Amino acid sequence: MKLSWRRAAGLLPALALAAVALVAPAGPASAAPGAPAALSEAPSARSALNAQGALDTPRARGVSSGWNDYSCKPSAAHPRPVVLVHGTFGNSVDNWLGFAPYLVARGYCVYSLDYGQLPGVPFFHGLGPIEQSAQQLSGFVDRVLSSTGAAETDLVGHSQGGMMPRHYLKFLGGAAKVNALVGIAPDNHGTTLLGLTKLLDYFPGAADAIDGVTPGLTDQVAGSEFLRKLNEGGDTVPGVRYTVIATKYDEVVTPYRSQFLTGPDVRNVTLQDLCPLDLSEHVAIGLLDRIAFHEAANALDPAHATPTGCGSIG
């Protein structure tokens, strides 16, 4: 029996919640067990998020190791601020405890936002409808550009955060405000979760219920209506440079080559082509991997790029 994308979505929350401890290490220990109950109480996340898109939250405001500093002014060497876009179940701080200080130390003005919040669910974001999350990104980019006086920004996103900005670029006028999008393990064409979605033939009726409380998950299933619209007519838009950094050991966005984009001004990179010894999987490539960080920095400043290899850990 052929699976519809909505039926495939039924397995996503259980698998994603199992990874919460990895994705958000700084959250309180009690948060993960409480998350399912909070989600079950949400009446309809697709409608509730309309009033939820607050950009100026304590976590979004928090200056941590020099980022989210709205007094920062871009230098001649790095004239564009960098906006970091977290992944599903991530947030503006925990997802970037490695990469944000890495960029700040190199002289960038760096900012990160929370998006896709659900009512009553702290810390674990990226669960709301992706179209609405892209609207939150749009407002945040405008704020950063206004603060810094820059004409354009660069975006770096992990997982959903590397794919969601493409909706902003394609449908919300973001291409005029963005120079480059760097996706680290982005689910550009959705995921099959290693083929596990085939098991959902045994769980009829679950997907519609899940879609009502965590629509950001169903939007990411390969073949979803959201992804069909996003990729229809081509993966890219003119005027933006795209870089995708993937790992062949990705166990969340599968098959990993589905992360790659097709179009002009696209560079697709497999981490193991840069360093065969690198064993990073989906979470580690965004949170910890200095080789991926080096390649992302190259994408932000290609005129001064240096070769990336196993020794690129400084």
Image: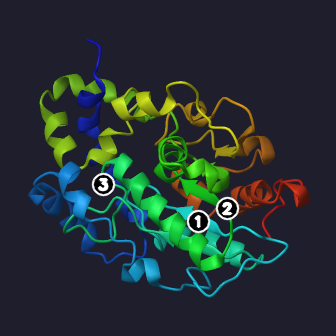
User: Percent from the top left, x then y, of residue 282?
Assistant: 53, 49
Residue 86 shown left or right of residue 223 in the figure: right
> Does residue 261 show up?
yes
Give the labeled residue for mark 1.
Answer: 83
In the depicted structure, whether residue 2 falls above or below residue 220: above
Marked residue nearer the N-terminal end (2 or 1): 1
Q: Amino acid at mark 2?
A: Glu
Marked residue nearer the N-terminal end (1 or 3): 3
User: Percent from the top left, x then y, of residue 222?
Assistant: 41, 30
Marked residue nearer the N-terminal end (3 or 2): 3
Q: Residues within 10 Å of mark 2 (few under 14, many from 20)?
A: many
Q: Nearer the viewer, mark 1 or mark 3?
A: 1
Spatial separation of the CA atoms under disc 2 and disc 1: 11 Å
| Residue furthest top in the image | 1
Residue 196 shown left or right of residue 66 in the figure: left
User: Percent from the top left, x then y, of residue 134?
Assistant: 43, 52
Give the labeled residue for mark 2.
Answer: 152
Secondary structure under tag 2 reads: loop
Q: Nearer the viewer, mark 3 or mark 2?
A: 2
Residue 194 shown left or right of residue 206 in the figure: right
Give the labeled residue for mark 3.
Answer: 17
In the depicted structure, whether residue 260 falls above or below residue 135: above
Query: Residue at point 70% right, 78% down?
Result: 104
